[in-house]
Image (cartoon, rainbow, N blue to C red):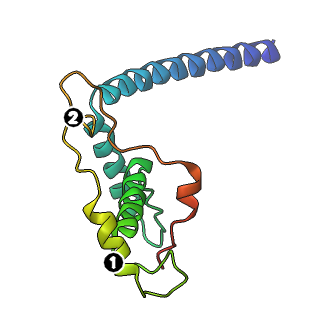
Amino acid sequence: MAAEAEATREARAKVIAAEGEQRASRSLKEAAEVIAETPSALQLRYLQTLTSIAAEKNSTIVFPLPMEIMRSIIYSNQHNNNNNPYSNQHNGGSSTGTHEKNSRNMRTQQHHTDKDLGRGDDEPTEPFPPLPDEEILDVPLIS
């Protein structure tokens, strides 16, 4: 009889735990829907998490950057290096004649309008232009 009563208590405990998990998952789903509606809410939650981690002593925080920001920085660096008249990256370190060639390239560059950049009234825009994989590999590491 004691074993039967213990088995009944354990079964009830499992049911109660399962109901609690179900309520928790519903709450998490609702929170995810709210956060999905406003991207700034996700950023605030992220910062709250960092604040709670920072309160602990002797903890290391790895601060990941969103890939969109990195893509923008990489694109900007490559664009600036390609248009820099003093860059000697493409001619093996010699700057002889580089200034004239790059100045000519800079003068003949096409100037983009807002419409060219995808900012027209009827065109969807991407936050940053996509980069081919081979361009990402050529970016020098910052130490």
Q: Residues within 10 Å of mark 1 (few under 14, many from 20)?
A: few
Rendered position, 102 above or below 116:
below
Q: Nearer the viewer, residue 97 or 113?
A: 97
Residue 26 pos. (x, y %)? 45, 18
Name the residue type under label 2. Lys
Residue bearing the label numbered 2: 115
Name the residue type under label 1. Glu
Q: Is residue 86 visible?
A: no
Residue 33 pos. (x, y %)? 36, 22
Give yes or no for contact between labels 2 and 1 (Cβ–Cβ under 8 Å).
Answer: no
Rendered position, 8 above or below 67:
above
Q: Nearer the viewer, residue 71 or 7?
A: 71
Instruction: State which quadrant residue 35 falls in.
Output: top left
Instruction: State which quadrant residue 81 falls in.
Output: bottom left
Q: Nearer the viewer, residue 94 or 8?
A: 94
User: What element does badge 1 sit on?
Assistant: helix
Residue 48 located left or right of residue 96: left
Residue 14 pos. (x, y %)? 65, 19
Q: Residues within 10 Å of mark 2 (few under 14, many from 20)?
A: few
Q: Nearer the viewer, mark 2 or mark 1?
A: 1
Residue 87 located left or right of residue 20: left
What residue is at 52 percent from the left and 17 percent from the top? 22
What residue is at 37 percent from the left and 73 percent from the top? 101
Distance of mark 2 from mark 1, alpha carbons? Answer: 31 Å
Query: Which mark, by number, is residue 9?
Result: none
Residue 50 located left or right of residue 131: left
Q: Is residue 45 visible?
A: yes
Residue 36 pos. (x, y %)? 35, 27
Query: Which mark, by number, is residue 100?
Result: 1
What residue is at 55 percent from the left and 65 percent from the top? 138
Rendered position, 85 above or below 50:
below
Looking at the figure, which quarter contains the N terminus? top right
